[in-house]
Image: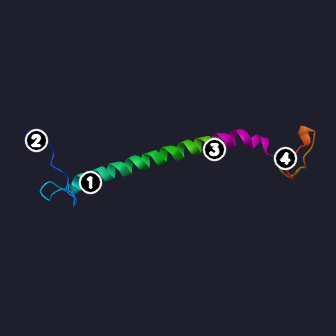
Amino acid sequence: MTAPGPKPARAGGPPPDEFRPRPRLRRVLGAAFAALCLAAVLLAVGVLALVLGDLARDGAPALSAQFLTGYPSRIPARAGIRDG
C-alpha cells in the first residue's frame, strides 16, 4: 500500500470542485500591489528630483553668458563652449 499523495494534475487545469475564485481577495491584493507600485514610483521620482535640484544648485553659479557664448580658450577664465 502506498501513502496517499497529491492528486495528479489534469490537462484541463484543476477540477471544478477544487477551484475557488476569491474576487474580494484578488481586488484587495491588486489594490495593495498598485499602492506599492505607486509608492515605489513616487520614491524614485522624489530621489531624482533631489539629485537634479542639487545638481542645478551646484552648477548654476558656473553658468554665465560669457561661458555659453564664448569660444574655447587656453585661459580658463575666458573659456566658453560656443564651438563645442
SS of the residue under disc 3: helix
Q: Is residue 55 one of those drawn in magenta? A: yes
Q: Residues within 10 Å of mark 4 (few under 14, many from 20)?
A: some
> In front of the other: label 3 or label 1?
1
Q: At x 17% / y 50%, what residue is drawn?
A: 8
Q: Amino acid at mark 3?
A: Leu
Q: Which residue is mark 2?
A: 4
Q: In the image, what residue type sits under mark 1?
A: Arg
Q: Position of residue 78 (x, y in %)?
A: 91, 42
Amino acid type for the residue under numbered disc 4: Phe
Q: Where 3 sits versus 31, above or below?
A: above
Cα separation between marks 2 and 3: 62 Å
**Which stretch is magenta?**
54-67
Q: Mark 2 packing: few (<14 Cα in 10 Å), some, or many (20+)?
A: few
Residue at 23% across, 51% down: 25
Decide if residue 23 is on the left or right side of residue 47.
left
